[in-house]
Image (cartoon, grey):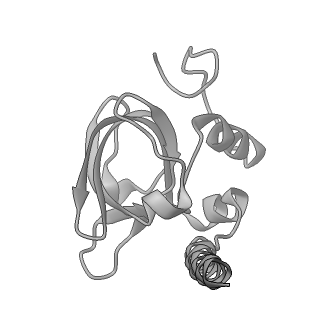
Amino acid sequence: MRRFLLAATVGVIASLCMADAARACSCAGPEQIYKDRKVAFTARIVDKEREGAGHLFTYQILRIFKNQERWGLKEGAEITMPVFGYRLCASPRKVGEREGVMPYRDRETDELVANGCTVTSPKSLLKIAQKNGDVQRDSGAANGCGAA
């Protein structure tokens, strides 16, 4: 009986933890997020370090699909930004890997930031950008996600 109660208690606690994680990751689909963003690009992760409740990512921009002029993003340039909720809501990526990034302006800092909902695979971001007519040139990369 004791083992049953212990197992039941552990099960309830685990399900509550998973429910919290699921709620924390409730996102609009990437297509809707893309439409709501003024900036979207594919990038290679150059550096990733833990910072507070999130991570600080340094990306090398590979291909830009949306670029609000005020940010002055350029292909090949590096950008560092906080990414929150990454461990809960996105597949863990490693330095050297690529991802699609659809950051937004943080109202407090007036800087670009991202979260687990605003990162996706580079191929997914390319398809969404093509669907929305934002692919204006061929970068020469076979998958459209930036140079190797």
Q: Which residue is located at x 56 percent, y 14 percent?
A: 140
Q: Residue at x 30, y 70 (%)?
A: 53
Instruction: In the rendered view, tell whether residue 41 sits above or below residue 46.
Output: below
Q: Nearer the viewer, residue 21 or 142?
A: 21
Does residue 90 lie above or below 117 as drawn?
Answer: above
Decide which of 133, 15 is in the foreground and name it.
15
- Asked where in the image residue 115 lies, by quadrant, the reply is bottom left
Judge left or right: residue 126 versus residue 82.
Answer: right
| Residue 70 image-quadrant placement | bottom left
Q: Residue at x 61, y 25 (%)?
A: 144
In the image, residue 44 lies at what x, y percent? Answer: 40, 32
Query: Where's residue 142, x and y in %?
Result: 63, 15
What is the quadrant of residue 6 in the picture? bottom right
Answer above or below: position of 22 versus 66. Answer: below
Quadrant of the rendering where the N terminus is positioned: bottom right
- Relative to residue 147, is residue 53 depicted above or below? below
Instruction: Judge left or right: residue 3 versus residue 54.
Output: right
Camera sees residue 64: no
Please state the horizontal and vertical placement of residue 127, each as a whole percent of the image.
Answer: 72, 39
Tell me where residue 16 appears, x and y as whole percent: 60, 82
User: 126 or 70: nearer the eye?
Assistant: 126
Q: Is residue 32 left or right of residue 48?
A: right
Whether residue 44 is visible = yes
Residue at the limit of the structure toward the right, as seen here:
131
